[in-house]
Image (cartoon, grey):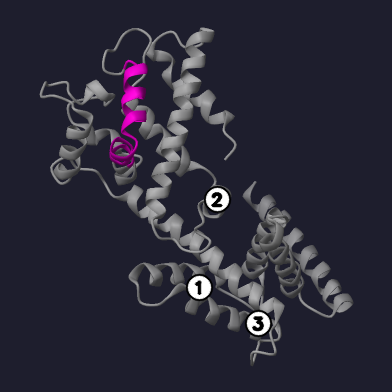
Amino acid sequence: MEDVDSTVANSIRRAYKAWKRIMHVVCDNSAIERISRVGFLAEIESNKSGQNVRLLRRQIWQLYGELMISDQLPHMNQVMHDIVIELTDGSKTEADMCTQLATEVCNRKHIPIPRGSKQLSLSYMFICKSLLTIVRIASARHLLKQAAATSVVYGENTDIFEELESLLVLGSGEKKWQAVGFQGKDPSTDFRRTGMVGLRFILHMAKYQPDDTTLIISESRTDIGTDIWYPFALAAIHTVDLLLRLPEYRFMETFIYRCGFIHSTDNVLASFYRLCGYILIEYHESWKKDVTAGKYVTIMDFEQSFKRFSMSLDL
């Protein structure tokens, strides 16, 4: 089956390459240059009136796809990965690195490069900005993955748990963590899939959205544990896990644009936590409707309830 898939993929790739050669002869320029020109015009229109945003985003990702499959630009995927790692180390600025990469792309694809203030190349400018956007999306994703891969250990994260305990006013009983929806006495065991992202999200919500947090715990009856209830902490962890498991580029692209990280990836984690908070509030409202409609009768319905909610989201 894999051999068949590989054969089909290679056939499609060869056909696409043949089509690109024909278009290169007809238009007298490369696919990357054509995409860049359309993208630049879409960006101008987007800046003026807010229109053509979808076209702009589509052109950026078409450009990215062309860069990944270009014969003149081998190992582009590895180059982009190395840029993200170097940015994490803080050795270079993202703008400098993307400008350098755009220059290499233009040289290899024979696209004019501006040599002075009066000789601006629209394609070159769009390639620079597109690479910067793609790198910032990759950087934001890398930050989230790093945090999610960092294990939560109660003894090593005592300060966070103590702050969370004081914010949630848990008391001192043996089941204090279960009272807010953790599964056992050691809350760190619940963060296996979300790592530090899950823990810091709950802390962030308790700290910066205290009224919402208190209301959700109260209305979900997490601290009472009657027949109809759901665990606040587990729902919060499910929310983080849901976003982390979404198709990476589809979600991160939307996240980058809507949160403004097209300009900077500063505070990307804090904005991610805010997004998680909004979605958790939405789940809580959805849960109340399920209860009213008789779809949620006991705690055993929690997983199904959250699954229905996650499928209804448009992210």
Residue type at numbered disc 1: Val
Give residue 244's position: percent from left, percent from top.
Answer: 45, 44
Q: On the picture, is 105 further left or further right than 141?
A: right
Q: Residue, x 50% and y 52% (percent of image)?
A: 259
Residue type at numbered disc 3: Cys
Question: Looking at the image, is mark 1 or mark 2 nearer the viewer?
Answer: 2
Q: Which residue is mark 1?
A: 79
State the extent of the magenta-drawn residues as a range.
201-221
Q: In the displayed structure, would residue 59 be above or below residue 193?
A: below
Nearer to us in this view, 104 or 203: 203
Dot 1 crowding, Cα within 10 Å, few <14, some 14–19, many 20+: few
Q: On the picture, is 66 further left or further right than 22?
A: left
Choose the circle earlier in sequence order: 1 or 2. Answer: 1
Q: On the picture, is 147 further left or further right than 189?
A: right
Q: Is residue 10 magenta?
A: no
Q: In the displayed structure, would residue 104 be above or below residue 172?
A: below
Question: Looking at the image, is mark 1 or mark 3 nearer the viewer?
Answer: 3
Q: Which residue is mark 2?
A: 258
Q: Which residue is mark 3?
A: 106
Q: Residue, x 64% and y 89% (percent of image)?
A: 117
